[in-house]
Image: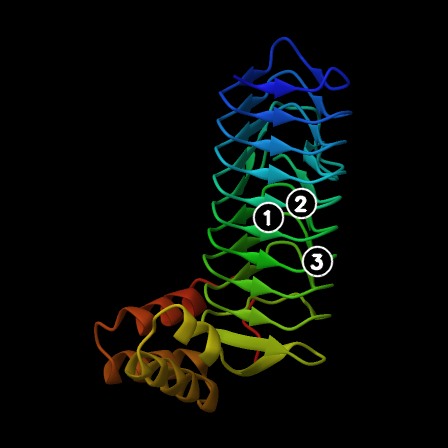
Amino acid sequence: MNIISPMAFVDPEAKLGDNNVIGPFCFIDKNVVIGNNNKLYNSVTIHTGARIGDNNEFFPGASISTKPQDLKYKGEDTLCEIGNNNSIRETVTISRGTASKGKTTIGSGCLLMENVHIAHDCVIGNGLIMGNSTKMAGEVVIDDNAIISATVLCHQFCRIGGYVMIQGGCRFSQDIPPFIIAGKEPTRYCGINIIGLRRRGFSNEAIETIHDTYRIIYANGIIKDGIQEARAKYPGVKEVEYICTFIENSKRGIIR
């Protein structure tokens, strides 16, 4: 049974699962699908195209599946997909997709703090933490278990690797490869995210291998040669292959 405040509006075409709580002054548009056990505090807006899983919390002022802030958007039907067990804090805005990808995707187990913005066609992984007032431009991709501190600005089309820690106030327009700390001004490589990796259960051996891989790659004048050397030294090691493949597939180049 859903609990819906008499001061909330739920469009008759919206589809709700079970045990959802919809607080006062919430607005749920048509063409919205919401799963089970979600809680929407007061003044949450769920726009058309939202597809929301289970056990999510939406705090006051959150605006989900908003019209893309992209002048190329011509009103096409697109989606904003949100997984399970997320905490979407106050005044977070998440745009739906455009014709480019058709949807914006948020994984599961994420914490998006106050005033975060996720633009159109972003692909956000699982287990992420984003600090207050951090902004992701269009078509950004973030891999699982990244931690992005407050007031970070990310250029469109960038990719952020898994298990990274990005220091507060950073702004960047290149990709950030996995397992590292990124910070300072301009944003650059500041070492391995050792504490984060230990908390995630990485062994000391794996951490040392990751550290040595970056030493090889960054010390080499030509990135391609560094990748070849790292692969030769650590054949078949999944963390090394993730790093090398990430860098090889980077379209904007990586921070140095």
**In the rendered image, which residue does mark 3 sit on?**
134
Helix, strand or loop under label 2: loop
Given residues 132 and 232, the one toward you in this image is 132
Front of the two marks 3 and 1: 3
The structure residue drawn at horizontal position 49% and vertical position 26%, both measured from the top left corner, is 35
Give the numbered dot on residue 139. Answer: 1
Are the residues tagged 3 and 1 within 8 Å (C-beta)? Answer: no
**Which of the 4 image quadrants contains residue 131?**
bottom right
Residue at the disc numbered 2: 119
Tag 3 secondary structure: loop
| Location of residue 29 (image quadrant) | top right
Give neighbour class at mark 2: few <14, some 14-19, many 20+ (Cα, 10 Å): many
In this view, 28 is above or below 70: above
Q: Earlier in the sequence, mark 2 or mark 3?
A: 2
Location of the C terminus (image quadrant): bottom right
Instruction: Kindly report the distance in space between the C-alpha atoms of the residues bearing marks 3 and 1.
Output: 15 Å
Tell me how far mark 2 sits from mark 3, CA to CA. 11 Å
